[in-house]
Image: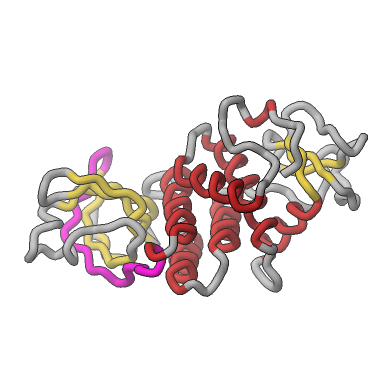
Amino acid sequence: MATIVEPAVCVRQWDWSETSQTVSLFCREFGLLRGLAKGSRREKANFSGGIELLTLGEIVAIPKVSALATLTAWDLINPFTGVRRHLDRFYAGMAMLELTSAGLQEGDPHPALFDSLVEALGLLAGGEADALVTLARYQWALLSETGSQPELELDRRSGKALAPATLYAFIPALGGFQGVDDGRTGPPGSWLVRSETLKGLRAVASGAGGAPDRAVAGRCVRLLASYARELLHAELPALKAVEEAVQGSTHAAIPTARVKPVRERTDHPE
């Protein structure tokens, strides 16, 4: 395959040897790329001293079919240093990388999502926006880019517009909400969700205007994280760390421990 030269964000990296690395990069036009950077940590190598997580650079690589790409250069563009200075921003940034790595297929380009990731990391690094709001917006961007975003306006049971209510039932298998008949319980496999959380998701999805407050943004993050786990059938440790931090700071009701499948938890509103 032809050599590619394009911007990329490092989403995973492993030491291959004392001087070399194996990395997973989210490239703007190529998509996810797994490659071997031989000699990347050598002082005079063309890799800006090594490829680190949460950094943006220009990559030169030769993709290969059914094998690791060969990386020949990495020119650091933005280290997003500010992300590492605050624990909540670091957790949010790592959760974004984890979602990107788990939610996309290798070699499947998503330039709009790449731009969203770079913008989100820039906001985290600059402290220009709340970390939870920034993470919730990126979660939504990834779900939308992959065609998995929840339906926020129509009742999944009736197909009509969701009527005003205090609580709603989110049904992950259907990717949307429905009204709760008795006000306290939803159908099997559903999660109870507060009206404020649904309103917060709508604000996140709109991408314009006001953002949800921190407590509501935290509940949005947790709901979208649980939904992502259901879709991917995988644990997401970085997202779990964010959820646990949110639970400790906001005293949210739903436990984050995944002792039972999410579909069995219907007794606490998100």
Task: Tell me: residue 87, above or below residue 13.
Answer: below
Is 215 in front, or is 67? 215
As drawn, is 213 to the left or to the right of 15? Answer: right
| Colour mode of the rendering | secondary structure
Q: Is residue 131 visible?
A: yes
Give the residue drawn at x 68%, y 34%: 173
Residue 196: quadrant of the picture:
bottom right
Q: Look at the image and tell me in which quarter the C terminus lies.
A: top right
| Residue 239, percent from left and from top | 50, 46
What span is in magenta?
65-83
Q: Is residue 252 magenta?
A: no
In the drawing, does residue 101 fall left or right of residue 72?
right
Residue 147 in view of the camera: no
Q: Is residue 66 magenta?
A: yes
- Above or below, 27 relative to 174: below
Q: Position of residue 171 (x, y in %)?
A: 73, 37
Residue sitting at the far right: 182
Q: Is residue 206 left or right of residue 91?
A: right
Residue plotted at (17% across, 52% down):
37
Total numbered circles = 0
Give the residue drawn at x 48%, y 48%: 99
Dominant secondary-structure state across the stretch colored magenta: strand
Find residue 114 and report its image quarter.
bottom left
Residue 13 location in percent, x, y? 28, 49
8 left or right of 208?
left
Between residue 257 and residue 8, name the one nearer to us. Answer: 257
Q: Is residue 172 above or below residue 218?
A: above
Identify which residue, 176 or 49, lies in the foreground: 49
Q: Position of residue 170 (x, y in %)?
A: 74, 40
Using the image as rendered, state which of residue 178 and residue 158 is in the foreground.
Answer: 178
